[in-house]
Amino acid sequence: MIILVSGLVLFLGVHLVPTLPGMRNRLLESYGEKRYKGVFALISALGLALIVIGYSRAPSEPRLFNPFPGAIAIAPIAMAVSFVLLAAANMRTHIRRAVRHPMLIGIGIWAMVHLLANGHAKATLLFGAFLAYAVIDIISATGRHAVKPFKPVAKQDAIAVAAGILLALLVMTFHRQLFGVRAVVWGI
């Protein structure tokens, strides 16, 4: 579990830097924007790799709680909503304008459903950490007024919905091959 924890600390730690504007601004001044973004991307990639490796190597036991049947039942719909929000996050959509922080809310939905649908220690650690990150970042982004104004384009909403649903269906279909657990009865 040390590898998983190390990956979470690196990945989520670097993603929490923007919640500390003073630190972020000092790093930008010290490194410059390109180098800051390069280091950010490098630490993120390393952290993500450690998360994947650490999760795959961590034991499934102990089980901390029994999965909630309701979470398992709503998971396909929740994941479709989550993927649509993630797709809409960097587009000029009405969804993004209405929700304000669609990426963080999408991550929160993904993490909450997976947290409640699992119960194993490693899953609780992984999804609990991502849920905590999403909550902290939403609170920070709201307090910092981190939403830039833009004019929504309906076509981009259609693209976000179509892409999000398509990606959710693909992930659900191949969930067992990707993550070792069959998510839907029609999955392969």
Image: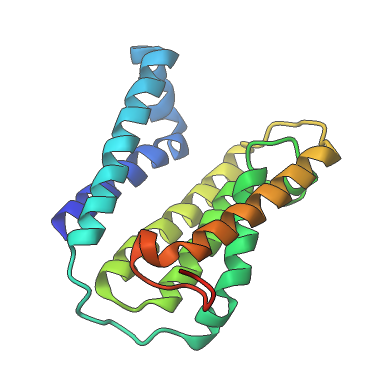
Residue 49: x, y in percent? 27, 44
x 61%, y 36%: residue: 146
Q: Nearer the viewer, residue 171 or 40?
A: 171
x 66%, y 48%: residue: 163
Horizontally, is 35 left or right of 10 in the view?
right
Number of residue marks: 0
Residue 26 visible, this angle: no
Residue 179 visible, this angle: yes
Horizontally, is 46 left or right of 145 in the view?
left
Residue 171: x, y in percent? 50, 59
x 21%, y 55%: residue: 54
Horizontally, is 111 left or right of 87 in the view?
left
Where residue 18 sits, quadrant-wise, is top left
Residue 21: x, y in percent? 46, 31
Toward the right, the furthest residue is 154
131 vs 12: above or below: below
x 28%, y 52%: residue: 52
Residue 25: x, y in percent? 43, 22
Toward the front, the furthest residue is 188
Which quadrant does the N terminus fall into? bottom left
